[in-house]
Amino acid sequence: MNVIPTSIEGLLIIEPRVFRDQRGYFFESFSQRDFEAQVGQVKFVQDNESMSTRGVIRGLHFQRPPFTQTKLVRCVLGAVLDVAVDIRRGSPTFGQHVAVELTGENHRQFFISKGFAHGFAVLSDVAIFQYKCDEFYHPEADAGIQLNDPSLGIDWRIPMTEAILSEKDLRHQLLAETETPFIF
């Protein structure tokens, strides 16, 4: 696998080695040994999958301590714009984000450390999105930031007038109004 650093510490793009022939392709989507050697030690405990249609934007989500989550995300069908926002107080990149297009064709994965809010926008007609988490989901620790917060400057590549959002995501506050529990 090829690990590509991003402009923000704690966010990595991972490209697996894909073997193609006349039958199709094969790749290891995850190897604990290779992951630990190139990224670090993370014990994933839960895998999630969602299916969404074009225009859906999910996010920006995080879990509060003591249930913070590191994630390894990928799109197995279709295309998404995946976004992680640095919400670690004192970080030189606080409030900045990295956006990566993940598709069923490019097989890229996005590694998101604790201390980031995460979301994605569906760019294809349908997308199946999978993610590994190093902590179980705890509804009492569920939190988020307004995904269209102007201070974040995120271009979701979906006009907000066409975006399909959940009621929960619409209720999140702006980053400046959110008490983020993460310290750099």
Image (tube, helix red, strand yellow):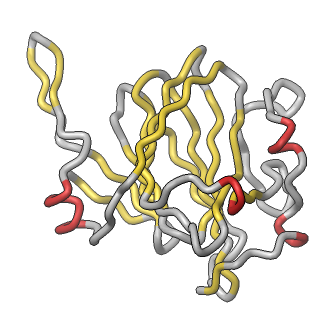
Position of residue 58 measured from the top left corner of the image (x, y, whole percent): 69, 39
| Res. 117 image quadrant | bottom right
Identify which residue is drawn at 16% across, 59% down: 34
Position of residue 46 measured from the top left corner of the image (x, y, whole percent): 42, 48
- Left of 109 or right of it: where is 181? right
Identify which residue is drawn at 87% across, 62% down: 174
Position of residue 29 measured from the top left corner of the image (x, y, whole percent): 25, 40
| Res. 180 image quadrant | bottom right
- Left of 126 or right of it: where is 164? right
Q: Which quadrant does the C terminus fall into? A: bottom right
- The count of marks equals 0
147 or 65, nearer to the observer: 65
153 or 74, nearer to the observer: 74
Is 24 located above or below residue 153 in the figure? above
Is 172 located above or below residue 113 in the figure? above
Position of residue 157 measured from the top left corner of the image (x, y, whole percent): 70, 35
- Left of 77 or right of it: where is 29? left
Is 88 located above or below residue 113 in the figure? below
128 or 43, nearer to the observer: 43
